Image (cartoon, rainbow, N blue to C red):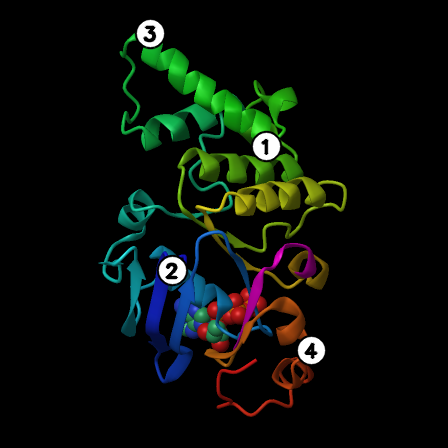
Amino acid sequence: MTHPSLLTEDLTIRFGGHVAVDAVSCAFNPGELTVIVGPNGAGKTTFFNMISGQLMPSAGRVMKDGIDMTRFPASKRARHGIGRAFQLTNLFPQLSVLENIRLAVQAQAGEGARFFRPVGRFTELTARAERYLEATKLQAVAHQPASALPHGDQRKLEVALLMAMEPDIYMFDEPTAGMSLDHAPDVLDLIAEIKHDKSKTVLLVEHKMDVVRALADRIIVLHNGRLVADGAPDEVMSSQIVRDVYLGTAPATEDASA
Ligand SMILES: Nc1ncnc2c1ncn2[C@@H]1O[C@H](COP(=O)(O)OP(=O)(O)OP(=O)(O)O)[C@@H](O)[C@H]1O
């Protein structure tokens, strides 16, 4: 039996009088890709922000592998293996794609940006960076400055930087947003590959139902900050509560059941 690697316990945040995420308790398991869906303003991104550490909850806890992460800043959570794809905030725009990936590999290896290191070590880190370059199909643009990449390749680079951190929790917030149709499958294939590694836990916020169908092992539904459904994709998508949520007829305080 697999043990959940990530748990939220009664996770709650209030902005003034507004409860944006309301006592959400959920366990996420290795080898499982969970998609978080819900209408606009349901609390999906806020829930994500509390897991990755961009926001501190008003109440409740975030646990990973038995460790309470609730008060850890995002950087410390990342060192504990909670990895979130961001739109190129960690990027050095003037450096090449490969150099950016190599810096992420170095950071993961705890080597910072040291310039002097044994040649063998340098070669090993470069080989690792090249593996991520290949995995994300960015070889053709390896030596281009990161800032010159078209949007689709930038999203792939985000995934490469995330993979280089070797997290065990992968978090993606609308990974194909703003992407042309010809680039989206590459990124979705990458996420599918990550989820095939049974030691990885993947969380995805997504609006596009074709993406949800292609990737989800499990779906959770947020509505007005509350978890209102949790289960297998077919079961959740055909449930009355989900139809109500999307048609706008759900009561605000519906219980969590698929
Ligand atoms: N920093 C903030 N201050 C005040 N209210 C906030 C803040 N961040 C989010 N909210 C509110 O919390 C609620 C949840 O927002 P959130 O962005 O998490 O929803 P979402 O489900 O991700 O929506 P979308 O699908 O549109 O991205 C919304 O009512 C939003 O206005």
Q: Is residue 85 above or below residue 118?
A: below
- Compute the Cα span from label 1 to label 3: 26 Å
Q: Quadrant of residue 122?
A: top left
Q: Is residue 69 above or below residue 144?
A: below
Callout in the foreground (2, 3): 2
Name of the residue lying farthest toward the top: 119
Inspect the image, locate mark 4, and give the three-letter code of the amino acid beneath it.
Answer: Ser
Residue 42 percent coordinates (x, y): 52, 75
Name the residue tied to disc 3: 119
- The residue sitting at 67% across, 70% down in the picture is 234
Examine the rendered structure and indicate whether residue 48 appears above or below residue 92.
Answer: below
Distance from disc 1 to disc 4, alpha carbons, whole Å, reads 34 Å
Residue at the spot of label 4: 238
Q: Nearer the viewer, residue 29 or 45?
A: 29
- Which span is picked out in magenta? 213-222
Q: Residues within 10 Å of mark 3 (few under 14, many from 20)?
A: few
Residue situated furthest front in the rendering: 1
Residue type indicated by callout 1: Thr
Q: Residue 139 at x, y = what percent? A: 61, 22
Type of residue at label 2? Pro
- SS at badge 3: helix
- Ranked by sequence position, the earlier of labels 2 and 3 is 2
SS label for mark 4:
loop
Report whether 188 appears left or right of 81: right
Q: Which residue is mark 2?
A: 4
Which quarter of the rendered picture does the N terminus lie within? bottom left
CB contact under 8 Å: marks 1 and 3: no
Label 1, secondary structure: give it.
loop
